Image (cartoon, helix red, strand yellow):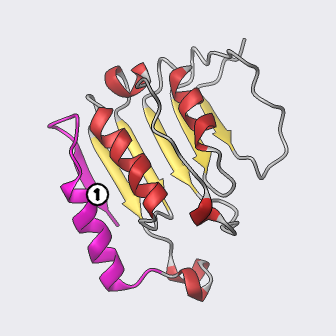
Amino acid sequence: FFFFFFFFFCYFVPQPRLPTGCVFHQLEHLEFCTCETEWDVLISMLQHSPKLLSLKLNEIHDNVVGCCNLHWDEPSSVPETLMLVLETFEWRNYRGWEIERELTAFILKHSRRLKIATFSPPACTLVREELRTTLQHKYGMITELARLPRGSAECELVFG
């Protein structure tokens, strides 16, 4: 059994594989690195974390080679954590790429208890020039995020 209240997960950092069927009964806060992400691992962790209050997605390692080609399929069932528990969602280094929008739309749509969703674009000084986010692009991301349906009427969107 795992008894985590906070857990950081990244494919880029060598770590033991998650056991099949593993349930993180006590996990309340998950930080999931998006640098080398297989999104099905994230969905699996959501499905097996019944007390997860807070989810943070963050590209820690600036390893975005091929990131736009990663594929995500919406799961056939919605993790109960989204419907019944998750209150805080944060995505740091959010670029508004299609795969990020799809995952964000899924999380916002199905999170019925979500109180706040925070999105932060990459800091210009920390990102290679070709990946920097322009002011016009930021405005477009804010507009797109605001238009997404939300499962919680109380959910506040923060962009900064």
**Residue type, numbered disc 1:** Val
Q: How many circles with numbers are drawn on the protein?
A: 1
Q: Residue at x 60, y 32 (%)?
A: 6
Quadrant location of the C terminus in the rendered image: bottom left
Where is 31 relative to 136, above or below? Answer: above
Where is 152 relative to 159, above or below? Answer: above
Q: Determine if the magenta segment contains residue 146.
A: yes
**Is residue 55 or residue 76 the one in the foreground?**
76
- Residue 37 at x, y percent in the picture: 65, 49
Q: Determine if the magenta segment contains residue 138.
A: yes
**Residues shaded magenta:** 133-160
Q: Residue at x 39, y 56 (%)?
A: 101
Q: Residue at x 33, y 75 (%)?
A: 138
Quadrant location of the N terminus in the rendered image: top right
Q: For numbered disc 1, what is the local secondary structure? A: strand
**Is residue 100 or residue 1 the one in the foreground?**
100
| Residue with the most extreme top position | 1
* Residue 38 shown left or right of residue 56 in the figure: right
| Residue with the most extreme bottom position | 129
- Residue 50 at x, y percent in the picture: 48, 17
Q: Residue at x 52, y 49 (%)?
A: 57
- Residue 49 at x, y percent in the picture: 53, 21
Dividing the picture into quarters, in which one does residue 22 lie?
A: top right
Crowding at mark 1 (Cα within 10 Å: few <14, some 14-19, many 20+): some
* Residue 5 shown left or right of residue 151 in the figure: right
Dividing the picture into quarters, in which one does residue 145 lie?
A: bottom left
* Residue 5 shown left or right of residue 94 in the figure: right
Where is 88 relative to 37, above or below? Answer: above
Report which residue position mark 1 lands on: 158
